[in-house]
Amino acid sequence: MNKTAHMFWISGILFLTVLLSACSTFTHGRGPRPFVTKVNLSDYRLVWSDGFNGNAVNTDEWHYRTDNSWGSTQLPANVSEADGLLRIDLRKQDAGGKHYTGGGIITKRHFEFGYYETRMRMPASPGWHTSFWMAGFDNMKSPTGASGGLQELDCCEQDSFEQSSYTHNIHMRKPAYLTGWTRIRTPNLTQGFHVWGCEFTPRHVRYFFDGQMVGVYD
């Protein structure tokens, strides 16, 4: 029996500023603006964004995540777009040797230094791992999965059994390295939308939650 356990929403903005939110980098004037206000981002310009204002995922810009890892299989059928929202269904459903299915999307364009931001709401039922992250690859043989990354900037990793916190970190796999693992205490993340941001420069990584800097790493 297929049963939708819960839904994960990304809303409004996903932008990259070389700003990446629901995703957007920005210029002075019109267009998406970053949620961060207490850090000077005035030198950035908007290079890419998606407000999810269509009736379907724009597959010219996005890969569907289709890997099979940990406790679930990721399916394109679980991802939909409407009314300015990207929705990801999380289902109790047999697929790929797992008893649950989820989903995700990954940009087809490759970005590097800049400011990334997303606005999203977490699922309420326990058992789900939701993330907003960037990964660098030594090749693009498996762009639709979670493996193969040389490095990883985890702006947000949230496990739904703990509704009022999330963690961030920086992951390196060659050599194996993990730094900045920090648990951030928050309001209940299932009760409304919140904004996560990441500034990535040659000198540092800075993580933000609802406009406030919550971590900076060399």
Image (cartoon, rainbow, N blue to C red):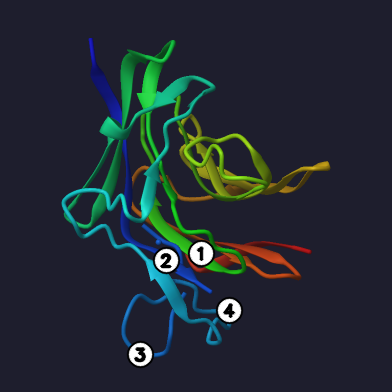
Q: Amino acid at mark 2?
A: Phe
Query: How far is mark 1 from mark 2, CA to CA?
Result: 6 Å
Q: Position of residue 179 (x, y in %)?
A: 77, 48
The reply to whether callout 3 and callout 4 are in contact (CB within 8 Å) is: no
User: Mark 4 sits on what residue?
Assistant: 39
Mark 4 or mark 2, whichever is nearer to me: 2
Tell me if residue 171 comes above or below residue 15 in the rendering.
above
Query: Which quadrant of the structure image shows residue 115?
Result: bottom right
**What is the secondary structure assignment of the residue under circle 4?**
loop
Question: Which of the two residues, 131 or 59, is positioned nearer the viewer here?
Answer: 59
Query: How far is mark 3 from mark 4, CA to CA?
Result: 18 Å
User: Mark 3 sits on what residue?
Assistant: 29
Q: Position of residue 201 (x, y in %)?
A: 68, 70
**What is the secondary structure assignment of the residue under circle 2?**
strand
Query: How far is mark 1 from mark 4, CA to CA?
Result: 14 Å
User: Mark 2 sits on what residue?
Assistant: 15
Question: Which of the two residues, 141 or 78, is positioned nearer the viewer here?
Answer: 141
